[in-house]
Image: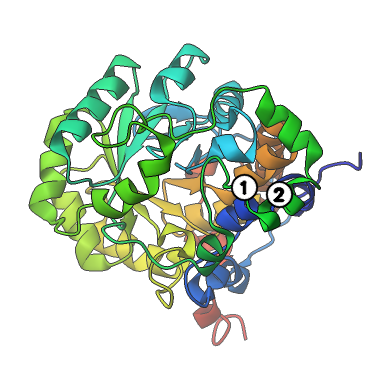
Amino acid sequence: MPAITEIADLKRLYRRRVPKMFYDYAESGSWSEQTFRENVSDFNEIRLRQRIAVDMTNRTTKTQMAGQDVAMPVALAPVGLLGMQSADGEIKAARAAAKFGVPFTLSTMSICSIEDVAENTDTPFWFQVYTLKDDDFMNRLMSRAKAANCSALVITVDLQIMGQRHKDIKNGLSAPPKLTPASIANMMTKIPWGLEMLQTKRRFFGNVVGHASGVSDPASLSGWIAEAFDPSLDWDRVKQLMDMWDGKVILKGILDVEDAEKAAELGADAIIVSNHGGRQLDGALSSIRMLEPIVRAVGDKTEIWLDSGIRSGQDILKARALGAKGTMIGRAFVYGLGAMGERGVTEALNVLHKELDTSMALCGKRDINEVTRDILLVPEDFEGRYS
């Protein structure tokens, strides 16, 4: 196998190995996918300042996110259906993250349950919840997360209703996949994936089936999703959920200055500037474009992280320089998971770390905690001082 030197290498392997409906689930956005694309392309408009004759020894990318020591300012974002990308995928990703020294966030819509991950890993992980109507289910979900020693709750606040993702509808996305002529034909070309799936019992939404009212079997899950999310969500409800947890809370899905200020006022331990990977409101600005205005407005009232569009260590460095204390990666580690399982997640983290460390050094910095905006050139800087 050729050496893995960039995230794109893992993406190519991932596409060859995983069925189309699950590849498309990860590698797509809503409607025209404009925001999905710009999440990545807008990073490319930001340039780095190369510096020379600077001591580059004794470098470190270690820092903290929400008080937790991390090997680099990265956490694995909550991604649904990981167990369909690779058998027992949530367990594999959690193990890889723990060994590397970065947090793993388990999605409510995971295939492996909270208990599955806790029983098969040794390091506390974070848990993500949506804002659902059913308080009883939400309470039991949080109690299960507490019992599993989850160390933080990530509340997704940008999914009151779901943005239309054309590919998921056309593919008939489901877990496990529905057997249609098209899906069968595609899965016949993914034999290693299929053999791996046959060896696990975890093929359904483990946190929901058998736990949520009216979901005693997988066939009723799609109807539950349509009815479960709470379209009446407001800031009072967000505060109620934070109080229900009574621990570290991170709010994910902030893309507006006023919303960021309100989230900070509520006492969130961190807020994540995110547009849900371009999967909600198509036409919204990329996360990286909204990061600096939010940082300026919120200041040090809470930690601000960046999610959506990160595909390289340089992206992590740019986000840090624009004020993000941490970042979350989704697709970058999913590519690795689908391509090579736990080893692939480790490969993805290694690639990102090497790029981050090397780029930081070439910008004249030895410590990620000393990185500031002075290592960047953004478009407005191209005239005047640097013209």
- Is 79 placed left or right of 16 in the picture? left
Q: Which residue is mark 2?
A: 184
- Is 82 placed left or right of 69 in the picture? right
Where does the image place residue 256, in percent across and percent down from the top left?
28, 67
Where does the image place residue 283, in percent across and percent down from the top left?
43, 78
Q: Residue at x 46, y 19 (%)?
A: 116
Q: Secondary structure at mark 1?
A: loop
Q: Amino acid at mark 1?
A: Leu
What mark, if any, has residue 179 been given in the picture?
1
The answer to whether any part of residue 339 appears in the image is: yes
Q: Secondary structure at mark 2?
A: helix
**In the image, farthest residue toward the right:** 1
Q: Residues within 10 Å of mark 1 (few under 14, many from 20)?
A: few
Q: Residues within 10 Å of mark 2 (few under 14, many from 20)?
A: some
Where does the image place residue 179, in percent across and percent down from the top left?
62, 47
Residue 8's image quarter? bottom right
Instruction: Kindly check if marks 1 and 2 are in contact, taking CB atoms under 8 A apart as contact.
Output: yes
Q: Amino acid at mark 2?
A: Ile
The answer for how far apart the CA atoms under marks 1 and 2 are is 6 Å
Q: Is the residue 83 above or below the residue 125 in the image?
A: below
| Location of the N terminus (image quadrant) | top right
Q: Is the residue 237 above or below the residue 166 in the image?
A: above
